[in-house]
Amino acid sequence: MATKSRNQGLRLAAAAIAAAAAVAIGAPAAAQQSPQIDFKSVGRGAPVMVDAGALPAVGAGYDRQTRAFIGSAPPGEAPKGIEPLPRDMFTSDDFYKDRALWSDPRYFRCNSTLAIEEMWTARGAIGDKGPATAAWGNCDADYPREAIVSPYPFKTAQQHYEALRAETTKRGGPTKHTYATVPGDEWTGRYGRASTESWYQARKIQLTTMLSLLTPKYQQYLVQEAYHSGNTNVAHWQSQYCWPEGFMRRWHQAAIRDHYITVTPQQVQIMTGIARNFVTNIMVGREFDMSGATPRIGADVPRWYGETIGFWDEDTLITWTSNVIGWKVHADFEYSNKMQTVEIYSPYRDASGKFLRRGRARGADPHRAQLRQARRSQRGPAVHLHRLRADDLPGQRQGDAADARRSLRLRGVGYVRAPVGLPLGKVLRAEHGAARRGGHLQLRVDGGPPNGAVA
């Protein structure tokens, strides 16, 4: 039967550092606090510099409720005090020839990639004679680049991960958990996002700042997409091709709501997405095979969501993901198969060690920030992890009635993931089926592109 929502929380934070020259991105974020550690770390615990939730939107558009214009100049006008370029993205007939202008915010009329993507929609501000009449975004707003790139000296995810493991070893770890000691009761559950603000969601960052994170090749890809979204109105969104959204979609805003987390000593599974098909299996204690194109666990074939290894430092889980398929998220840049991430998941507790209940802290930035999530259910997701597969059987809907109705509207179904009748599934259901203690779980990732370059 349905269980009552506890309105308790999970903080999910993430950031990434990419191998070779792929950019480090992390998770969408919320509160400004750093992880609670009592030592100076070589690669975790750096403060979040800027709260994205406190910044104004960058791009031009119209408020969904009031239809009031947002931006510095409505369609067909120019902002006061700013001299428009004789040629910009909305008037150019060949953006390739304009490369020297790409670093000037005026070329994109101070817009974000998200605003440009929506420019020709009902929310957009293209004007009566678009694209030439396209509106201007907020030229005084931006998410600072220095708050995105990594504060650490590591050049690759491997260096970052190995430094953290060496640090943990000096402190007596890594911790070898059993079912009796692993924080499954605290972590396992279904969580709903309580904050969705982050720079990676592309509302709070100028397109030129996003471009500065990329190598020339990927800069061209991003401008190409922006041009055909905002100028020619021939946009190409990856979902048009019915392919998976890819690894980085987990850090985006749209369609990423509930997170289902299941914890065992050997594996931690995270499922999210409307269909819960964005699956991360963290293999605790495993090592990557370094003989292929990228570090991997299985065959030398990239995976949509990559492969992930990790280790425990007491109740903190430190992970490394590699072997992803290069792809993109709408309104964001493309990334290559070299994309890798380091993610650090740690519980958020008070001075006495007790999980804290959900507060009202606002969102911050995804790169090295925290995504606050509210626990939706007292029970953990009934999934079985046998051979890394999760099978669906009709089951009881978790959450309160309102949540169930919302889920039915959004998903068209009213079922939870249920275990197959295998011993391990029964063990997990028995192990995690009891009422959960509430609290926050802070999934924190420290890191970022060492030089802001994506290959």
Image (spheres, rainbow, N blue to C red):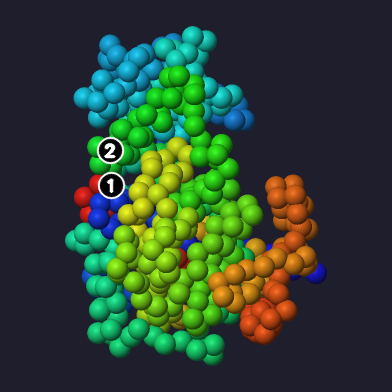
Where residue 91 sits, quadrant-wise, is top left
Dividing the image into 4 quarters, which one contains the N terminus? bottom right
Name the residue at 59% across, 24% down. 122
Where residue 17 sits, quadrant-wise, is bottom left
Residue 217 tag number: 2
Q: Is residue 245 visible to the viewer in this orientation of the structure?
A: yes
Element under disc 1: loop
Dot 2, crowdedness within 10 Å: few (<14), some or many (≥20)? few
Q: Is residue 152 left or right of residue 198?
A: left
Give the labeled residue for mark 1. Answer: 455
Mark pair 2, 1: CA separation: 7 Å
Q: Nearer the viewer, residue 100 or 241?
A: 241
Which percent across, then down, holds residue 81? 29, 16
Name the residue at 73% across, 79% down. 421
* In the image, residue 441 above or below residue 234: below
What residue type is disc 1 on?
Ala
What residue type is disc 2 on?
Lys
Where residue 414 sits, quadrant-wise, is bottom right
Name the residue at 27% across, 27% down. 102
Q: Nearer the viewer, residue 284 or 325?
A: 325
Q: Is residue 365 visible to the viewer in this orientation of the structure?
A: no
First along the sequence among labels 2 and 1? 2
Name the residue at 43% across, 25% down. 228
Q: Is residue 411 left or right of residue 325?
A: right
Kindly indicate whether the residue at mark 1 contacts the one at mark 2 (C-beta within 8 angstroms). yes
Residue 122 tag number: none
Element under disc 2: helix
Which percent across, then down, holds residue 366? 41, 52
In the current view of this chain or complex, which residue is farthest to the right? 1
Q: Is residue 142 left or right of residue 201?
A: left
* In the image, residue 389 above or below residue 216: below
